Image (cartoon, rainbow, N blue to C red):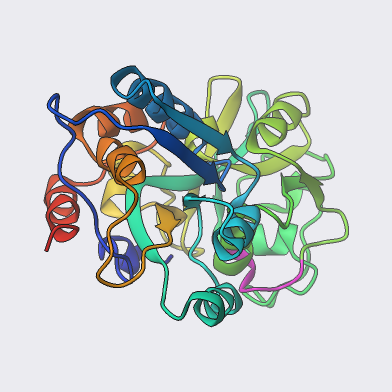
C-alpha cells in the first residue's frame, strides 16, 4: 500500500464492528485464525484477553504467513485470515470462484516495515532506490548498478563490509509488500537470504554487523537499529515511529487487515464477530500499541465499528 492509500482506511473492506462491552453475551465455539506473522503478538494478546471474557470459546492461532492465511481462507479452514498485504488478484479470484462473492475484510492496526541493521553498524539512513540496488537482481525501481557494500551507500560511512540482505520467505506478506514497494515486483538478489519469521530476521540482524534486513514494527527492539528511509535521493529520511506511520510520512507504512468469509446478507458466527469487535475496541487497540503496532485513528475506528451493523 502506497502512502497516499494508507489514509483511505478499509478501502475494499467490509468495515467492522460495535465496540467491545462488558455486557457481551456468553458464547461457545472456536475461532480459527491463520495468517500473518506481523500480527502474531497482537493476535495472541487479543486471544488471551478475549478468552477471559469468553472462556467457552477456543481461539486457535497459526501465524504462518499471509500466503498460508489466504489459502486457509479459500479452503474454508480459517475463520479469520490476518494479512500484512492485500489479497492478490489470483487469490481473490480463487475465493470468488469457490464461494460466489468476495471475502469480507477489516483493518485492525497500522504497521510499517522497518529496515534494520545491527546496533554496531554506523548506517543511519537509506533511500528506497538504494534498497532496490541492494536487494534486487533486476533493479526495476532504480535502474542503477547493484550495491554490494555499505561503503557504496550515501550514508555508508566508508564501512567496507559486504552487505548481507536478509528478509522473509515468499509465504510472508512482508516479503510480498517489500517486493512490490521496494523492488517494483522485481526479483530478489541471489545473495538474499529468506528466513521463516520476523523474529528470526531480527535475531540474525542483531548478530551480524554486515546484515541488512526488514521486519514489521512489532519486531523492532533495542537489540537492532531501525534505519530512517527516504522516498527518493533528495527526500528527507524518515524514522518508522508512530507519528510517521500514522501520517504516512514513513515510506513503508502499511495497513494490517483481517479477511473473513461472510456471505451477503448473512452474519458472521457470533464468536468470530465478537473477536473482531474486541480487536477494534479501545482495549484491543491499546493491546495493538503495546505490541509495537499503531492503533487506527479514532474517526476510522468509529466508522469501522458502525459499518458492520448498517
Residue 128 position by quadrant: bottom right
Dominant secondary structure of the magenta stretch?
loop
- At horizontal 13% and vertical 56% (from top left) the residue drawn is 303
Boundaries of the magenta span: 182-187
Quarter of the figure with the C terminus: bottom left
Q: Position of residue 178 (x, y in %)?
A: 60, 59
Q: Position of residue 270 (x, y in %)?
A: 30, 44
Quarter of the figure with the N terminus: bottom left
Decide if residue 13 is on the left or right side of residue 86: left
Magenta segment: does it hold 184? yes
- At horizontal 56% and vertical 59% (from top left) the residue drawn is 76
Q: Position of residue 94 (x, y in %)?
A: 59, 77
Magenta segment: does it hold 160? no
- At horizontal 63% and vertical 48% (from top left) the residue drawn is 65
Mark yes or no: residue 150 visible.
yes
**Of 172 and 116, the residue lying toward us:** 172
- At horizontal 60% and vertical 46% (from top left) the residue drawn is 155
Disc count in the image?
0
**Of 22 and 127, the residue lying toward us:** 22
**Of 251 and 202, the residue lying toward us:** 202
Decide if residue 240 is on the left or right side of residue 88: left
Q: Position of residue 140 (x, y in %)?
A: 67, 77
Residue 185 position by quadrant: bottom right
Mark yes or no: residue 158 visible.
no
Amino acid at each position: 500500500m502506497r502512502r497516499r492509500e494508507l489514509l483511505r482506511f478499509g478501502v475494499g473492506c467490509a468495515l467492522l464492528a460495535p465496540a467491545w462491552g462488558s455486557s457481551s453475551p456468553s458464547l461457545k465455539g472456536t475461532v480459527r485464525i491463520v495468517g500473518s506473522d506481523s500480527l502474531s503478538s497482537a493476535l495472541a494478546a487479543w486471544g488471551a484477553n478475549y478468552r477471559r471474557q469468553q472462556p467457552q470459546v477456543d481461539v486457535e492461532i497459526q501465524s504462518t504467513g499471509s500466503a498460508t492465511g489466504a489459502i486457509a481462507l479459500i479452503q474454508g479452514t480459517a475463520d479469520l485470515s490476518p494479512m500484512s498485504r492485500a489479497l492478490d488478484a489470483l487469490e481473490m479470484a480463487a475465493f470468488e470462484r469457490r464461494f460466489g462473492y468476495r471475502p469480507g475484510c477489516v483493518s485492525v492496526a497500522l504497521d510499517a516495515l522497518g529496515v534494520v541493521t545491527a546496533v554496531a553498524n554506523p548506517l543511519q539512513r537509506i533511500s528506497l532506490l538504494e534498497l532496490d540496488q541492494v536487494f534486487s537482481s533486476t533493479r526495476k525501481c532504480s535502474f542503477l548498478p547493484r550495491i554490494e557494500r555499505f561503503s557504496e551507500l550515501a550514508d555508508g560511512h566508508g564501512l567496507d563490509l559486504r552487505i548481507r540482505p536478509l528478509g522473509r520467505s515468499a509465504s510472508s506478506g512482508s516479503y510480498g509488500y517489500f517486493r512490490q514497494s521496494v523492488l517494483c515486483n522485481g526479483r530478489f538478489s541471489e545473495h538474499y537470504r529468506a528466513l521463516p519469521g520476523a523474529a528470526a530476521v531480527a535475531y540474525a540482524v542483531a548478530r551480524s554487523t554486515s546484515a541488512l534486513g526488514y521486519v514489521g514494527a512489532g519486531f523492532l527492539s533495542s537489540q537492532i537499529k531501525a534505519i530512517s528511509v527516504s522516498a527518493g535521493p533528495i527526500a528527507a529520511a524518515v524514522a518508522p515511529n508512530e507519528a510517521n506511520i500514522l501520517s504516512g510520512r514513513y515510506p513503508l507504512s502499511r495497513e494490517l487487515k483481517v479477511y473473513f468469509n461472510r456471505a451477503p446478507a448473512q452474519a458472521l458466527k457470533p464468536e468470530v464477530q465478537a473477536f473482531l469487535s474486541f480487536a477494534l475496541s479501545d482495549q484491543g487497540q491499546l493491546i495493538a500499541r503495546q505490541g509495537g503496532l499503531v492503533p487506527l485513528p479514532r474517526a476510522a475506528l468509529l466508522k469501522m465499528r458502525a459499518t458492520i451493523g448498517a
